[in-house]
Amino acid sequence: MKRFLPHAVLVASLIAACLPLIAVGAFGFFNVRDGFTIAPVLELFARADAVEAVANSAILTVLTVVVGYAIVIPSLVWMHLRAPRVLGLAETASLLPYVIPAIALVGGVNLVLRPLFPGIFVSLYSLVPFYVLMTLPFMFRTIDSGLRALDLRTLMLASQSLGSRSIGTFFTVVLPNLRPAIVSGSLLVVMMASGELVMAQLLLHQTFPTLLIELGQSQVRLAAALSFISIVGSWLLMAVMVFAGRGRSATGRATQFTI
């Protein structure tokens, strides 16, 4: 009995997690007249505004990951090497997006900057700094945990003793060892950035979540179908990134062992 109890709990949890998703998919893709159909989804993506909304979300997500890690990784490496006493303060500061609501952040920045720069929020890319701030806790904690798992100072000294410069050591030694942390953090960042609604809606930009809200007011089945596609797509993306990260890590360990 004890042997089968964990498996029973796992199966029950999977059923509880999948049943609502199956119900959403059935509601979105089936109707009484046509049965199973994806025609409404195909018709939607024939529209330019729908394609633009999905493209905007994809662009914002990629830029959030790139810009966020371009700021967080060098900063944390420097703090771990040169200013370890600042790490506690930096960690506390990175948690501020949890405390400050998105609507307050956007409203405050809008109130201060719009009179000085009237067209600053017209561009879609004005959302990138907000998205980076929103996902900062995830990026900071994952990279900080990855660096704490490394003997960073010894790696840097060993690499420099072999003639490598600090920049070369950063790209050839530190970043490859941070790959699992980057992958796990990127999963969280992608989920948050691709599903963010409040900031895009307040700044009047068209993204995939705002498209879902608009469709939910008039085409409920289509909105349910798109929600099903986005959830399943997110799961598949997570699986691909996790297995890709494991495969590369295993290859790297095998190469080091051979050397």
Image (tube, rainbow, N blue to C red):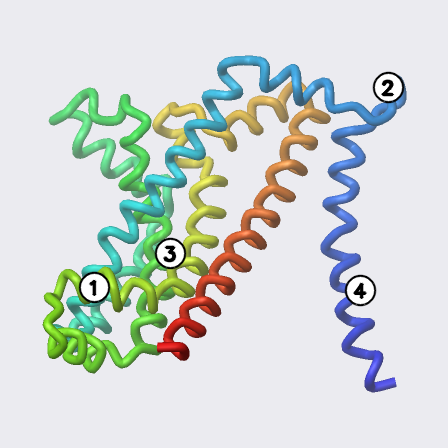
Where is residue 101? Give x, y as percent: 37, 47
Between the residue at mark 2 and the residue at mark 4, the CA separation in whole angstroms equals: 33 Å
Between the residue at mark 3 and the residue at mark 2, the CA separation in whole angstroms equals: 45 Å
Dot 1 corresponds to which residue?
Answer: 170
Q: Label 3's element? A: helix
Q: Nearer the viewer, residue 174 or 120?
A: 174
Q: Earlier in the sequence, mark 1 or mark 2?
A: 2
Q: Residues within 10 Å of mark 1 (few under 14, many from 20)?
A: some
Q: Is residue 164 above or below residue 136?
A: below
Q: Amino acid at mark 1?
A: Phe
- Quadrant location of residue 39? top right
Where is residue 246? Give x, y as percent: 50, 64
Q: Label 1's element? A: helix
Where is residue 52? Give x, y as percent: 46, 21
Dot 2 corresponds to which residue?
Answer: 34
Q: Earlier in the sequence, mark 1 or mark 3?
A: 3
What residue is at 79 percent from the left and 57 percent from the top?
15
